[in-house]
Image (spheres, helix red, strand yellow):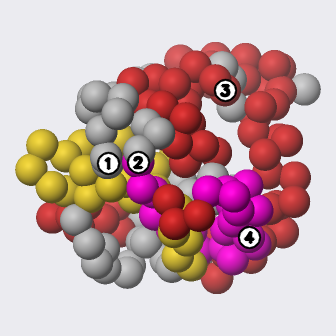
Amino acid sequence: MANSVQHAFDLAAEDYDRTRRRLVPGFDDFYRAAIDLIRFPRESTLKVLDLGAGTGLMAAFIAYSFPNARITMVDISNEMLARARARFELAGERFRFEVSDYGVDRIQEKYDAVVSALSIHHLSDDQKRSLFDRIYSALNDGGVFVNAEQFRCATPERHKFHHDRWVTRVR
């Protein structure tokens, strides 16, 4: 599974940022809502782990909102992280990049915030349970985990309604 996900995202890396605005309804509001859940003062020196960081979209929102944050971006796709490295090439040591399968690999350090956007849904339920345990163990006291994700509605009818609406907007 991991290799097929890695391959798919390696292939998608070049156009990833451009397609996000079309595929994620309310793109800016989606990311802003996630950032608003990181309830630390703006000037805090935060240590942040971004799981499934891709090209660094979530990290860019965090970097803007928390100018003293140090962000570690983890992704299974080297091509995605290559785009992130290019995005943040002038930022120096503020950003770190790790090619890793966060679905199975250990989280080595402690963080004030662990974030993920539109990524964890690729894991099986068992992998999610294991990951959530590892995230909890990796959070500093008072730390926060934000999983910005799309999800199924409570009923199949509501899900179909919203999915069809999304498809129409994307087209």
Q: Which contiguous range is marked in magenta?
A: 69-91
Residue designated by label 2: 69
Within 10 Å of disc 4 (Cα), the crowding (few <14, some 14-19, many 20+) is some
Q: Secondary structure at mark 1?
A: loop
Q: Mark 4 vs mark 1: which is more N-terminal?
A: 1
Q: Amino acid at mark 1?
A: Leu
Within 10 Å of disc 1 (Cα), the crowding (few <14, some 14-19, many 20+) is some
Q: Mark 4 vs mark 2: which is more N-terminal?
A: 2
Distance of label 4 from label 3 (alpha carbons): 22 Å
- In the displayed structure, 60 sits above or below 103; it is above
Q: Amino acid at mark 4?
A: Ala
Whether residue 154 is visible, yes or no, is yes
Residue designated by label 3: 27
Q: Quadrant of residue 107?
A: bottom left
Quarter of the picture holding the C terminus: top right
Residue designated by label 4: 82
Residue designated by label 1: 46
Position of residue 165 measured from the top left corner of the image (x, y, whole percent): 73, 17
